[in-house]
Amino acid sequence: MRVSTKICIALFAFAGIFDLVAVTSRTFSDWFIDHIFPVFPGVYGRLTSLVPFSVGEWMVVLAIALLALFLVLILLLVFLHRRQGYRHFVLRYVRFLVWASCLVFLEMSMTCVVLYHATPLEEDLSGYGKTYDLEDLTNLRDALVKKCNTMAAQMPRDADGTIITGSGKEMQEEARAAVQNLSTEFPRLSGFQVRPKPMYFSWLMCQGYMQGYYFPFSMEANYNDLMEVMNKPFTMCHEISHTHGYLFEDEANLLGYLACVESDDPVFQYSGYLGILNYVNNDFYAAVSRDEYESHVAVSDLVWTDAEFVSSDTWDQVEEASPLETETVHEAADTSLDVTLKANGVSSGKLSYTHVVGLLLMYYDGDLSAFE
């Protein structure tokens, strides 16, 4: 057996054992995330942050191209199997793919799998273990809606009513600063803050109804550059939190929200409130009758406009330019996300995003003075 083959087998075995230990030992997962994981954003993430485009996005493109080439080579092997040189080339290519798979498996273990088995963030919140009722949810919802309505009226706007914000680079830097600022409350967020990057294939993210994406392969926080601007600050902070080991979506939602509302930038503050509005409002709507819902403070039309995911004009451009059907992409993205989360122990799958409401109740624990 070749030495390279032995090394590859050893790495696969190590990754498998690592996953087993991570799944069965929360203590190990916590230790790894606190002491070893920061090396990834601190070194690898620092390097990829120097590149202005999403490295992970093009790694996916490369992976698809390599797989397509493999299929072509296998088909040609049917006709060229008698040529020794060609057979040797295919064999070397297969070895390369096996090695690449080995490295991907190993990195996924250390930058993804282990993160799902650490101590939940909720255990660090003041309201952990307490029970909250409809009154608590109602108070949170009404305070949040009032805050959004007030901020919507205060935002600087142009003649078309669009909120005036800084440039993309300025927003990226503010997101990094906002997460760093939050690290005083959540120390795991300290260290190097990766630079959020817009996705080149943002049109595909629109069709998948995706605002952002964390690439463990490149330790990058990516965001949909075609979505409406008020989604961007919250999404940037959400995705950066993933690069610090907070992989659960509800936890990243809470941290993204807190980073924004504790920022000195009003645009970030408003984006943070908008980022959780739908989760809280939808939970309240589902818990009461229609008459009860309508008796409470209403979300203003201006807020709903600001909270829009993608403008109608952008949707028209996406639909016209994309070779894929939006419904197909959306279903594929939903299924992929749901399967990935459930495979990593998140039993509620994509619904885990909405769990941020429970975290908010625990975080504020009845003290809603921050919304005043």
Image (cartoon, helix red, strand yellow):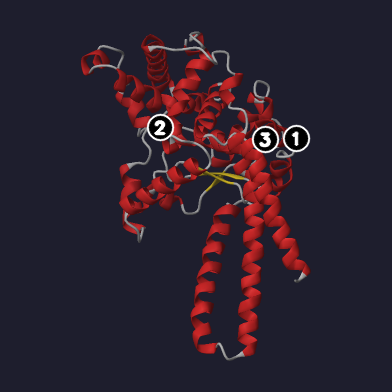
Instruction: State the residue in front, 174 or 13.
Output: 13
- Under tag 3, what secondary structure? helix
Question: Which residue is tagged 2?
Answer: 158
Tell which residue pokes out farthest to the left in this image. Answer: 291
Quarter holding residue 320: bottom left
In this view of the protein, can residue 48 be seen by the observer?
no
Q: Which mark is residue 29?
A: 3
In this view of the protein, can residue 12 be seen by the observer?
yes
Quarter holding residue 230: top left
Residue 287 at x, y = what percent?
31, 19
Quarter the N terminus occupies: bottom right
Q: Residue at x 24, y 17 (%)?
A: 289
Question: Which residue is tagged 1?
Answer: 35
On screen, residue 37 above or below 11:
above
Instruction: State the residue in front, 136 or 268.
Output: 136
Q: Name the front one of labels 3 and 1.
A: 3
Residue 355 at x, y = what percent?
45, 27
